Amino acid sequence: MTKQPLTLNIFIHEDLSSYGRYDLYNTHFSWFAEEIQNLSGRKISINMFSPAEAKTLSGTDYKNIYAAASLDAWREKLESHFGSRLKEDSHARFNKYLLLTRNDINPSVLGIAQFKGYAGIASITSDMTPAHEAGHMFGAT
């Protein structure tokens, strides 16, 4: 029996609108896809949405002195956009939603994610941060 695949949905913030999704994927996620598949034994789909494709999500205000407040605001925005299915255990376990940003959340926080949850925010100021936060969403410590 085939294991249910994983999905990482990446919403490119409007402050990254000058970046191409393929360049962002190659820099921050190409190696992650192979790694997570090897670790989990599951296929993963990585979907990247440009600001034009996700207008209601790509303008999210993520800069905050309190990173947890930024994450809560992102989670609430996702719930408003996608509805209650995000809270279903089976959906949240296999489907993740990452806001990819140009800048850090604050001077000391590059990204934040729910551990084994569905919501995360990550800046591209470090090549590793987006995959690091996605890893937390999939249960990596």
Image (cartoon, rainbow, N blue to C red):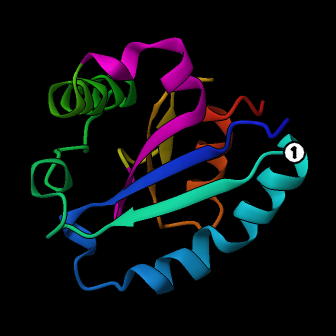
Q: Which residue is mark 1?
A: 41
Q: Is residue 109 visible?
A: no
Residue 89's x, y, as percent? 53, 13
**Residue name at image x 26 percent, y 70 percent:** 50
Residue 76's x, y, as percent? 22, 23
What quarter of the picture does the C terminus occupy?
top right
Q: Is 89 in the magenta?
A: yes
Along the line of sight, which residue is nearer the eye, 45 or 33? Answer: 45
Along the line of sight, which residue is nearer the eye, 34 or 16? Answer: 34
The crowd level at tag 1 (other Cα within 10 Å; few <14, some 14-19, many 20+) is few
Secondary structure state at the residue bearing disc 1 = loop
Residue 104's image quarter?
bottom left
As displayed, is residue 86 above or below residue 107? above
As displayed, is residue 78 above or below residue 105? above
Residue 86's image quarter?
top left
**Residue name at image x 22 percent, y 77 percent:** 17
What quarter of the picture does the N terminus occupy?
top right
Q: Is residue 30 visible?
A: yes
Identify residue type, mark 1. Gly
Along the line of sight, which residue is nearer the eye, 36 or 105? Answer: 36
**Residue name at image x 19 percent, y 67 percent:** 51
As displayed, is residue 79 above or below residue 23? above
Residue 113's x, y, as percent? 51, 33
